[in-house]
Structures are given as C-alpha cells and as structure tokens.
Image: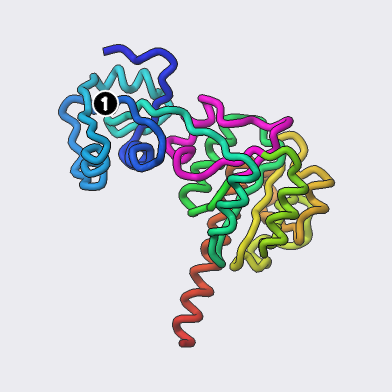
Amino acid sequence: MTKPPNAPLVGGVHAVIAALQADRPVYHVWRVAGATHNNSSLDNALAKRGLVSDVVDRAELDNWLPDIAHQGIAAEVAPPESIDERQLKRLIDKTGETSLVLVLDQVQDPHNLGACLRSAAAAGVDAVIAPRRRAVGLTATAVKVAAGAAHIVPFACVTNLARTLGTLQAAGYFAVGLDAEANTAIEMLDLTGRRIIMAGGEAGGLRRRSAECCDELGTIILEDAVESLNVSVAVGVTLFEARRQQRAKHLGARQVG
C-alpha cells in the first residue's frame, strides 16, 4: 500500500480518536498488522464513522510518520481550518469561568506552533489565536507536529490582534503576557479565572504593543545555566501552571465548603 498523494496524516491512538471525533472528514485509517488497540473509544469512534481500518506494514507507517509515536495506527484526515473573528466570538461567549485562551504573537516556526497546539489541547485550552500577518498558519508541518491537537483546539487567525485582545478582555478575560524581563514569576500571578496566556515569537518575544495590551506580565524563573526557553516549552509550563492553580483553588473551596 502506498500513501495517497498530499494526504494529511495523524498518528497515535489518542490522536486518531480525536480526529475521528472532530467534525472533519476522515478518509482512511491504517493499522499495523498484528497491532492491538484494546480501546473502546477507538472502536466506537471507528464504528460511528462507518470506517474499517486497513492493514499496513510498520516500516511503511514509520516512513509516513517518521517523527510521530504512531503506536501502529494512523488516519488520513482532511486538514483542519482556522476560524475567523466572528466564529471566535461565538466560541468565547460559551466559555466558562476557568477558560484559558492562548495567544501566539508572531510565532513563525510550524514546529513551534504544532507543539503549542499539543500543549493547548492537553491543558484544555478553549482557543489558540494568532495574527494573520507575520505568523505561521495551520501548515501541513504544524498539523503533523500537533499530532491530532489541531483537530481538537480551535485555531483563530485574526486581522487585528490588539482589537481581539480588547474584545476578550471586555468579555471578562485577564491577559497575562510572558516576558523574560518581567519582574514577577508566573507562579506568583493569579491564573485561576478567565485567562489569556500570551507568548511572543521566536525572534524577539512579545512585541511592545502586544505587551502593552496585557493586564500583567510574568516570567519563568530559570537557572543561570539556561538563558531562555523555546516558546512552545514556555507555553506548556505556563498553561499547566494555570491549571495547577485552578485545581488548587477548586480543592481549597471544596475543603472549606
């Protein structure tokens, strides 16, 4: 069997389940001969789509997805599409009091975008936002690195990032920007409510105008041997710090109650 031309593939049990459950066409599913996936969610998702997996050699699947831990399963999926400002507004109107939104200010490396999308999906982020200009979109590489996350987290491309931030802040969001020169460590900030986490691009971090739009700036304290973190790593650290704080606050409220 040969790979269909220009076919976007996602690999791994959870990534394939996410693709099957997303509102996107799934054309084929392949499993390595002899591979077993005792996963009722996977079987149910396949059955719901009316799909039967085809058999493929592991070496061939390794060749299709050389950098992905595919676990012997892959799916050919229609590429995800970004949403616009109007769709973003409708989505935000439905979010709860612990909503997280990730804003990426001019991230241009598709590998970084893909990694950010994976962290965003793992942290339960409601949307990822990026400007249309001077930023990478949902390229094939970004989608591949995201390993299914691009089908889970809505990705919005906006014309005016400052205006979008203002709209979110008017809806009750508090914007926290990541800045290596900030005086406050992220763990000292309150990340428990409706929060925007904003990270800058690879070249110079947050632009001055973007930083000015934030309600507060925070930094990740590093050991002296390390000067800076990759943007995708910094995003992951901050998103999970936010979720940690939210869990701690919820647990504290339950104990008091």
Left or right: residue 100 versus residue 67 is right
Q: Position of residue 100 (x, y in %)?
A: 58, 57
Magenta part of the chain: 128-157
Q: Alpha-carbon neighbours of circle 1 within 10 Å: few (<14), some, or many (≥20)?
A: some
Apparent side of residue 212 relative to residue 190 in the rendered image (left or right) = right
The furthest residue to the left: 34
Q: Which residue is label 1 attached to?
A: 30
Quadrant for residue 200, please give it. top right
**Residue 164 higher or lower than 218, as above or below:** above
- Quarter of the image with the N terminus in it: top left
Q: Is residue 146 magenta?
A: yes
Image coords of residue 71 (percent x, y) = 29, 34
The coloring applied to the image is rainbow
Q: Can residue 201 be seen in this snapshot?
A: no
Q: Eyeballing the image, is 208 above or below 195?
A: above
Residue 137 percent location from the top left of the image = 61, 31
- What residue is shown at x 67% (from left), y 61% (from top)? 171
Callout count: 1
Residue 177: say if magenta.
no
**Name of the residue lying farthest toward the bottom:** 257
Secondary structure of the residue carrying numbered label 1? strand
What kind of residue is marked 1? Answer: Trp
State the residue at coordinates (53%, 57%): 240
